[in-house]
C-alpha cells in the first residue's frame, strides 16, 4: 500500500470495480449475478463507483431497466449529473459479463481487508486512551469481529441444483451403506432413539432444549457430551449456572455406575470403590471435553470462547447452559432485544464454526398453571419469538412424574409400553416433522437412558460400546468458499 499524508490507502482495486460495474451495465445476466453477491455500496471504494452502484441498485430494486440511459437519469435524480461520462467509460471498458461473480468476490475480499484495517486502527487508538473502559473495548472488539464473520457467511455463493444433487447423492450413499444405529449424518445426540429421529444434530443447527427447572436439561446435555467424547468428537460446554466440579461429577455419574450422591456428598464406604473410581478417571480424563463455568455471561464472551475451542481443539459441538442467563451488553436494558440478538448470534456462530450448538432454555411458569396436562408448548418459551425463529430444532423435556402425574393414565400407554417415562417433544424441527420420542430417567444418577438399553445397571465401560460402530457423515465446507479461490485464504 502507498503511504499518503493522512495514512495508508485502504485496500481496493479500481480496475476490478470498473469491470464489475461495466459488466452490470452491459449484460442483464451479469447484473443479476452481481446483485446476488454484492449487497450494498460499501463493497466499492472509489466514491464515484459507490454512487453509480447506488443508482443501479435503486433501479434494480424497483424492477426498472438498468442501462446507460436509466442509470444516467437516476444519477441526475440523485443530484449526481456529472457522472454521465463515467457511465459511458464503464460500459465501454468491458465486452461481456464473463467471470463477474469471481470479480465480485475479489471486491468482497477488499472490503474485508478495509474493515480489518479500520477496525484495528480504531480499537488501537481507543485502547491507548486510558479513560476508556477495557471491558467495553473487548465487547466492541467482539462485535466488530462478528460483523466480519457475518460478511463471510452472507458472501457464500449459491449453487446450481446439479451441485447440490451431488452432495445429496454422497449423503444418500453413506446412509444406504450404513445399517441400524450407524445411520448418523451429524453429531451424536447421545441417545439411539433421538439419533433415529434426527440422524444426529447437523452442522450449523441451533438446537434449543427447553424445560422447567429440575426436569433434566443439563443431564440430557451431558449425556450428549459423554457419548460424543467417547467417539473422539471434541465438545465445548459453557455453564452459566453450574461449577466445573459439579459438571465433572455429573459426567462421571452418567458414564459409570456411581451415584451422584456418592460423588458429591457421602463419598465411598468401601476401599474397592476407590479402585473402580481410579479406573474410570484414567478412562474419562482422555475425553476431549472442554468446560468453562464463569466469565462467559455476555454473548460476545461466548463467541470468543467458542472460536478459540474450534481453532485449538476443533470441537464438533458446543453446549451453552442456559439461554436466560446470557446477556448482550450492546442492547442496553431491553431484554427482548437482548434475547433476539443472543439467539441470532448463536445461530450465526453455528453456521460460522460449522457445528451444532445446543442451548438450554427455561420455560415460563405458564406450564405450571395449566390443568391436567403440563406438556410444554412453543408459547411457553420465555421471550419465545426470536428463539423460535432462529432455532432449527426446539426440544421439550416432559416428565409427567415430576408433576406427580400417574403414568397409568391411558394417554401415557404408548410411552410406558416402550419402557419410557419421559417425553422428548420435537415442537419445531426445520429439517423434519414434529413429534415425540421417549427416554427413561434414572434419578439417583441424574441421567437419561434409552428405554431399551439393557445396560442401565452396567458399568460405564460397557456403555461405552453403545456407539462403537457409528460412522458420522460430516460434509466439509470452508468459510473461505465465500470468496472463491482468489487472493486470500482465511
Image: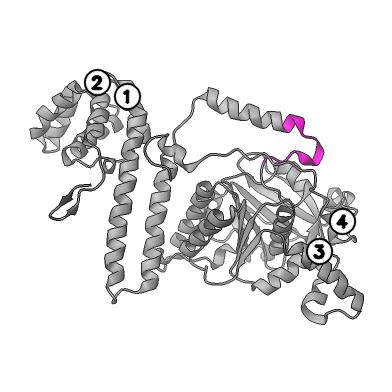
As helix, strand or loop, the secondary structure at mark 2 comes to: helix
84 shown above or below 253? above
> Magenta segment: does it hold 408?
no
Marks 2 and 1: CB-CB under 8 Å? yes
Q: Residues within 10 Å of mark 2 (few under 14, many from 20)?
A: many
* Marks 3/2: CA–CA distance: 70 Å
Q: Nearer the viewer, mark 3 or mark 2?
A: 2
**Tags 4 and 1 in contact by the CB under 8 Å rule?**
no
Q: Distance between the residues labelled 3 and 1?
A: 63 Å
Residue 243, position as x, y percentages in the image:
64, 73
Q: Which residue is drawn at 49% across and 25% down?
A: 160
Where does residue 336 sit, x and y in percent of width and height?
46, 61
Q: Which mark is residue 30?
A: 1
Q: Which residue lies furthest to the top in this view?
A: 95
Nearer-N-terminus badge (4/3): 3
Above/below status of 176 relative to 135:
above
User: Going from the N terminus, do you reach mark 3 or mark 1 first?
Assistant: 1
| Earlier-in-chain disc, 2 versus 4 | 2
Q: Quick one: 157 or 282, which is closer to the camera?
A: 282
Calculate the distance from the C-alpha at mark 2 to the C-alpha at mark 4: 69 Å
In the displayed structure image, the side of residue 77 where residue 284 appears, left or right: right
What residue is disc 2 on?
26
Q: Which mark is residue 401?
A: 3
- How packed is label 3: few (under 14 Cα within 10 Å), some, or many (20 or more)? few
Q: Which dot, 3 or 1, sits closer to the camera?
A: 1
Who comes first in sequence, dot 4 or dot 1? 1
Query: Residue 445, position in %: x, y?
Result: 81, 67
Question: What range is drawn magenta here?
Answer: 175-185
Q: Nearer the viewer, mark 2 or mark 4?
A: 4
Q: Spatial distance from mark 4 to mark 1, Cα to Cα?
A: 61 Å
Amino acid at each position: 500500500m502507498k503511504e499518503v499524508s493522512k495514512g495508508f490507502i485502504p485496500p481496493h482495486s479500481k480496475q476490478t470495480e470498473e469491470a464489475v460495474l461495466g459488466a452490470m451495465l452491459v449484460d442483464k445476466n451479469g447484473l443479476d449475478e452481481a446483485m446476488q453477491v454484492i449487497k450494498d455500496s460499501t463493497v466499492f471504494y472509489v466514491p464515484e463507483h459507490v454512487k453509480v452502484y447506488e443508482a443501479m441498485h435503486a433501479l434494480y430494486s424497483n424492477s426498472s431497466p438498468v442501462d446507460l440511459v436509466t442509470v444516467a437519469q437516476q444519477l441526475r435524480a440523485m443530484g449526481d449529473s456529472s457522472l454521465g461520462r463515467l457511465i459511458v467509460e464503464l460500459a465501454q471498458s468491458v465486452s461481456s459479463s464473463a467471470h463477474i461473480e469471481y470479480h465480485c468476490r475479489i471486491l468482497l475480499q477488499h472490503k474485508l481487508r478495509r474493515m480489518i484495517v479500520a477496525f484495528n486502527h480504531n480499537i488501537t487508538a481507543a485502547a491507548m486512551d486510558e479513560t476508556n473502559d477495557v471491558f467495553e473495548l473487548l465487547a466492541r472488539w467482539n462485535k466488530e469481529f462478528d460483523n466480519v464473520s457475518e460478511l463471510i457467511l452472507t458472501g457464500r455463493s449459491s449453487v446450481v441444483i446439479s451441485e447440490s444433487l451431488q452432495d445429496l447423492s454422497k449423503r444418500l450413499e453413506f446412509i444406504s451403506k450404513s445399517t441400524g444405529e450407524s445411520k448418523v449424518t451429524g453429531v451424536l445426540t447421545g441417545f439411539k432413539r433421538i439419533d433415529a429421529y434426527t440422524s444426529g444434530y447437523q452442522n450449523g443447527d441451533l438446537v434449543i432444549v427447553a424445560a422447567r427447572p429440575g426436569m433434566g436439561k443439563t443431564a440430557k446435555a451431558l449425556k450428549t457430551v459423554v457419548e460424543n467424547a467417547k467417539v473422539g468428537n471434541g465438545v465445548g460446554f459453557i455453564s452459566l449456572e453450574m461449577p466445573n466440579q459439579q459438571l465433572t461429577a455429573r459426567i462421571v455419574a452418567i458414564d459409570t455406575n456411581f451415584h451422584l450422591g456418592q460423588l458429591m456428598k457421602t463419598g465411598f464406604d468401601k476401599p474397592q470403590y476407590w479402585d473402580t473410581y481410579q479406573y474410570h478417571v484414567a478412562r474419562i480424563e482422555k475425553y476431549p471435553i472442554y468446560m468453562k463455568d464463569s466469565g462467559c455471561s455476555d454473548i460476545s464472551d461466548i463467541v470468543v470462547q467458542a472460536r478459540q475451542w474450534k481453532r485449538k481443539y476443533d470441537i464438533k459441538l458446543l453446549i451453552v447452559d442456559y439461554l436466560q442467563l446470557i446477556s448482550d451488553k450492546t442492547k442496553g436494558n431491553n431484554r427482548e432485544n437482548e434475547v433476539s440478538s443472543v439467539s441470532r448470534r448463536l445461530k450465526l456462530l453455528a453456521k460460522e464454526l460449522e457445528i451444532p450448538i445446543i442451548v438450554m432454555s427455561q420455560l415460563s411458569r405458564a406450564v405450571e398453571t395449566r390443568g391436567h396436562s403440563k406438556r410444554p408448548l412453543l408459547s411457553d418459551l420465555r421471550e419465545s419469538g426470536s428463539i423460535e425463529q432462529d432455532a432449527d430444532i426446539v426440544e421439550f423435556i416432559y416428565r409427567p412424574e415430576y408433576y406427580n402425574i400417574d403414568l397409568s393414565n391411558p394417554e401415557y400407554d404408548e410411552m410406558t409400553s416402550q419402557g419410557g417415562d419421559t417425553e422428548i417433544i420435537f415442537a419445531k424441527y426445520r429439517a423434519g416433522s414434529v413429534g415425540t420420542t421417549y427416554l427413561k430417567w434414572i434419578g439417583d444418577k441424574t441421567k437419561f437412558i434409552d428405554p431399551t438399553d439393557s445396560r442401565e445397571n452396567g458399568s460405564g465401560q460397557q456403555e461405552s460400546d453403545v456407539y462403537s460402530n457409528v460412522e458420522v457423515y460430516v460434509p466439509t465446507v470452508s468459510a473461505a468458499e465465500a470468496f472463491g479461490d482468489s487472493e486470500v485464504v482465511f
